[in-house]
Amino acid sequence: MIADFDATRGLTMIPDRVVEVLNGPAIMFVGSRDAGLRPAHTTAVGAVAYEDRQTVTFFVPESRSARLLSNLRDNGRIAFDFGLFSHEAYQLKGVYLSSRPTTDEDLARQEAYRKKLVTAVRQAYPEELARPLVLGLGYHPGIAVTFRVEEVYLQTPGPGAGTKMA
Amino acid sequence: MAAERPDAQPLREQLVQNQKTIDRLNRDLARVSNEVRIIQQISNEITSTLDLDEVLRIVLRAMERVLGFKHSMILLTDLTADRVRVAASLGYEPSGVGAEVAFGEGVIGVVAGRRKLMRVAHVGASVAYFRTVRARLEAAGQVTPGGEVPVLPGLPEAQSQLALPLLVKDRLVGVLVVESPKPNAFDELDEVLLGIVGNQAATAIDNARTYQMVESLSRLKRFFSPQLAEAIVKGGADDPLKTHRREVTVVFLDLRGFTAFAETADPEEVMGVLREYHAEMGKLILAHEGTLERFTGDGMMIFFNDPVPLDDPAERAVRMAVAMRDQVAALTGRWRKRGYDLGLGVGIAQGYATIGAIGFEGRWDYGAIGNVTNLAARLCGEARPGQILLSARVASEVEDLVETQEVGALTLKGFARPVQAFDLLQLKPRA
Amino acid sequence: MATLPEEIKAAMQGVIPSHVVTCAADGTPNATAISQVYYVDPEHVALSHQFFNKTVRNVRENPRALLWVISPLTLDSWDLEVEFDHAETSGPVFEAMDMQIEAIASIVGLKGIFKLKSADIYRVASVTRNVGERIPLSDIVEPRERA
């Protein structure tokens, strides 16, 4: 279901660096809320930004998707946060467009993402933790959720955290 | 067979659950009882010794043996009361003993400053997070890059740290630290157990340190005035009995005519005179903050500028000598009435001496050796009753203070060339 | 109110960052990572409030928050539905947080720059262990190159 389209909202261009991090070995998760403004959290495993620099698709395990989808169908609001192990992090806020089961292509993307991630995690944590932490993430069967980005925020801790970038 | 009651199954499950809980509690209890028992034993060992190094060794060894802590250290408060210093460690190469941590620096410094326990499960993660913030602050120009980062003792890759303050009543004695290269290595039970050990250790360390101080104090009191001895112990200065070289002003004095007097007079009277003489001379030495190095009957050697450094050692020496001459003049006046003919002779010189403990176990003396002591002694020997002889060096140091008269070059035993000497006449009247 | 299980303490040591999702009064969710959720007691947790950020602003308008924490020991994760209760500027929770910040800040040479504004105390409304978020280790498929 496509949320109400607000023609008055300006087009947002996701900056290059933000796309880079989104494609990089980042930990990512989605915030949503229900009709009673109760927040919910879902871990995402991989994401992709499109050529238009405004549309993003992320993937969540099907077993964890029920609440998220129910929230999105109710109000369509998404907060998508992702960050590297160096703590460089960004948040994309936007509106839900559509969802579908993951395809083979998505799966390939997710496997590439996991491979990158496990290498990066090894820098920060001992092997006994790094490997299961990343490779133990449930990811398929999965749901691909697509949304339109309306705002981009810097989330890296320190001065400027929470600053709107676009 | 009788049918089972309908509620038997859930009851059975409940029993199994309860049993599991009981087993877990028993295991925890056994762990605690065992450790508490051994800790009680440790506390006996600790409180049975007053040797500080021994106490520290016992504590660290016990923590390894009983609690399995492979890396631990004890830092003790410094007399400046704004830092702690590593006094003993186990599991560190190099030992890190002597390293300082200022209050507020790192986990140890914060625990010392706030006097509260702290446990960090993943130092690396926390530090990395703050480093990112620092990088952002530098990028924003709010912090200069390459700022001060303290060098702290401990494992370079420590991930878990548990530090607790060692307190006696509310006074900080030191900090007890355990570390591990693994994250999340310590739990709440470790905090409790370490707390028990820490309490015992704090008291034992405090007692050992106090004992150490008292020992030093009584040892030093043999050589110095009580105030001086205390100042040395409290100041935490290097042990003055350790050999060192210092420029000092040396005063030698003795009572002329004393030998003859001692041979002819009544022993009671001799001791009486000596006692009076020592009492008066002693007062003046204290008043001028001199160090009495030795006295042999009527002879005394006093020097200035060690162990306590002084701005004006030559001046003090000279003032003291003048005061002593006046005092003895008053005393000899009294003694002459009783038939004794005694007079004070003084020699004062200035120069470098080697100073430290000389003697042997059980009979140490604080000695100063050098040309300067010989010179002062020889000048004293040359002095007539009531005369104070100064070396050229001293005379020039105090030329504004006293009136002197050259007595010419004296030939003194042990000196190749004749030595210039000056007779101290009197203090210059103030303008 | 729900009770925090013993095992969750390991997830509250700041070893692996936690996540917090809040929602503004206007319905916009906010998702961000935080270094640590602090265990206060079986029914309360705390977050450190250093800068006035969106999370703080949101819970002052709408007290409900979702905290996701993960244990470095078992890799179990939990969703905690919590509600902002009050902010403390003194007391044992505040002091413990403040000490930790002071210690780590000094290690990276940022002494005195960080001030803990308050320790924000949250009541725990529900605790859900996330089953299905993880694949059993025996089933892990190593990422492979696809033809």
Image (cartoon, rainbow, N blue to C red):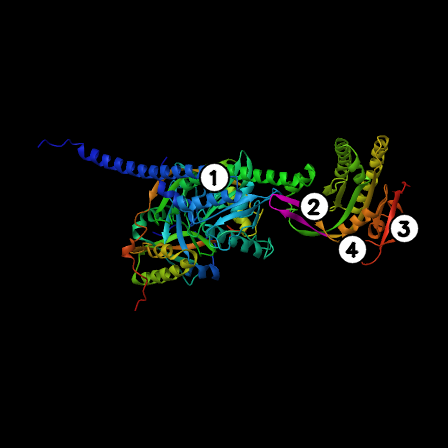
Residue at point 54% right, 37% down?
Answer: B207
Q: On the image, numbered disc 2 is attached to which residue?
A: B307
Q: Position of residue A99 (x, y in %)?
A: 33, 54
Which SS does the magenta portion mostly show? strand
Seen in the image, is B140 located left or right of residue A93?
A: right
Determine whether label 3 and label 4 are within 8 Å by CB.
Answer: no
Q: Earlier in the sequence, mark 2 or mark 3?
A: 2
Q: Earlier in the sequence, mark 1 or mark 4?
A: 1
Segment tinted magenta in the rendering: B353-366
Q: Are marks 3 and 4 on the same chain?
A: yes
SS state under label 1: helix
Is residue A8 shown to the viewer in this render?
Answer: no
Dividing the picture into quarters, in which one does residue B24 lie? top left
Q: On the image, numbered disc 3 is attached to which residue?
A: B406
| Amino acid identity at mark 3 | Glu
| Amino acid identity at mark 2 | Pro
Q: Nearer the viewer, mark 3 or mark 4?
A: 4
Q: Position of residue B374 (x, y in %)?
A: 77, 51
**Furthest-left residue in view?**
B1
SS state under label 4: loop
Q: Nearer the viewer, mark 1 or mark 4?
A: 4
Q: On the image, numbered disc 1 is attached to which residue?
A: B46
Is residue B174 shown to the viewer in this render?
Answer: yes
Say which chain tag 2 marks.
B
Asked if residue B29 is positioned above or below residue B147 in the image, the reply reads above
